[in-house]
Image (cartoon, rainbow, N blue to C red):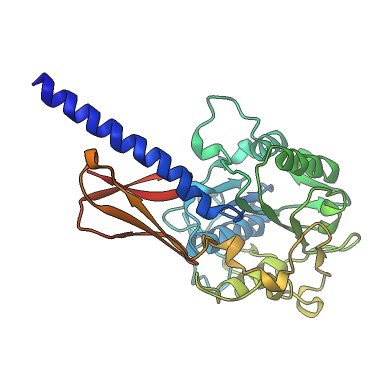
Amino acid sequence: MRMKLLMIVITYTCISHHFANNVGDASQILKGKTHTNNWAVLVDTSRFWFNYRHVANVLSMYRSVKRLGIPDSQIILMVADDMACNPRNPRPATVFNNAHQHINVYGEDVEVDYRGYEVTVENFVRLLTGRLAPSTPRSKRLLTDDGSNILIYMTGHGGDGFLKFQDSEEITNVELADAFEQMWQKKRYNEILFIIDTCQAASMYEHFYSPNILAIASSLVGEDSLSHHVDPAIGVYIIDRFTYYALEFLERVTPNSDRTLAQFLQVCPKRVCISTVGVRQDLYQRDPNDVLVTEFFGSVRNVELTSHILELPKCGGPGKVGLNKSNSGTSVKEKTPVSVSYVYADQLPIHRVS
């Protein structure tokens, strides 16, 4: 019995040692590729029934990124008020972004990570910079790294140089810029797509100074960001203009779409938005014509098309395991008939003999 146990331990150790060495080799395949995962931080900062449209804005964006493949584990959703359960809501447990009410953006699987009075400036900045208490659950953490593309979408009431939270506090454009710089210094992102739908929204990106940030604002300094239409059955405006046309564009995007950020920048011309959409590109190192929308709104990985064979040592039994990469993500292909299960190391899936 002891002899059999010893043989099992030796075999397991040998295989583990072999895979540890080869994972290091395999990870070199991705060297030079900086974008490895996508995250989304979606923030509504407004409370009260008359701000229904801001909750509809953020839930609509949440629905779009989930449909395009970003999982809830990589989405941080901050909603300052629960419109679905508001006593004024004529259709409880629903939130609509269109007067025809054909899409309930609240849905049946919404995972709100920060709710109500948890949506504060302090919590938002701590989330971005990773300065959270050790007891903070994983669902409330932005677990990004220097390979992460992050979509940050914010909606609410703003002014020249600030965005209000809960009508009781505000974050300034300087504080937001410094938070992004902390993220860059701590290697918490590869690129950021910052979108803000609020009055005088362009003032919020004026002080950005960190690299690899593309910023989009629904209005310039001195302009209001206007709502789109009222739902008579609900009695309030239910979505803002910029977000309405952005979502109209995103509804035509699929996970394999070739639509680019340059096209997304044109979604709301002044004739329909009324306000002037602002864009800041000087910190962004790539041409938006060459960047797919799904590099921020979806979960597509950019990896090289290549192959790598892992040779199993004799103590682990015969066989080879092949890793095939494609532009749509990382996949694993079996070269010989072996029983396998998946494990993850350095975000590169490998086979483990069972």
Q: Residue at x 85, y 42 (%)?
A: 174
302 vs 80: above or below: below
Viewer-closest of 217 and 306: 306
Residue 286 x %, y %: 73, 64
Quarter of the figure with residue 118: top right
Question: Is 135 on the left-hand or right-hand side of 263?
Answer: left
Viewer-closest of 345 and 165: 345
Quadrant of the image containing the N terminus? top left
Viewer-closest of 225 and 20: 20
Viewer-closest of 107 and 49: 107
Q: How many marks?
A: 0
Question: Is 232 on the left-hand or right-hand side of 181?
Answer: left
Quadrant of the image containing the C terminus? top left
Furthest residue in direction bottom, as rendered: 271
44 vs 131: above or below: below
Residue 302 x %, y %: 55, 62
Q: Residue at x 62, y 74 (%)?
A: 249
Quarter of the figure with residue 50: bottom right
Residue 57 x %, y %: 63, 60
133 vs 304: above or below: above
Question: Is 142 on the left-hand or right-hand side of 318?
Answer: right
Residue 11 visible to an observer of this rendering: yes
Residue 81 visible to an observer of this rendering: no
Furthest residue in direction right, as rendered: 222
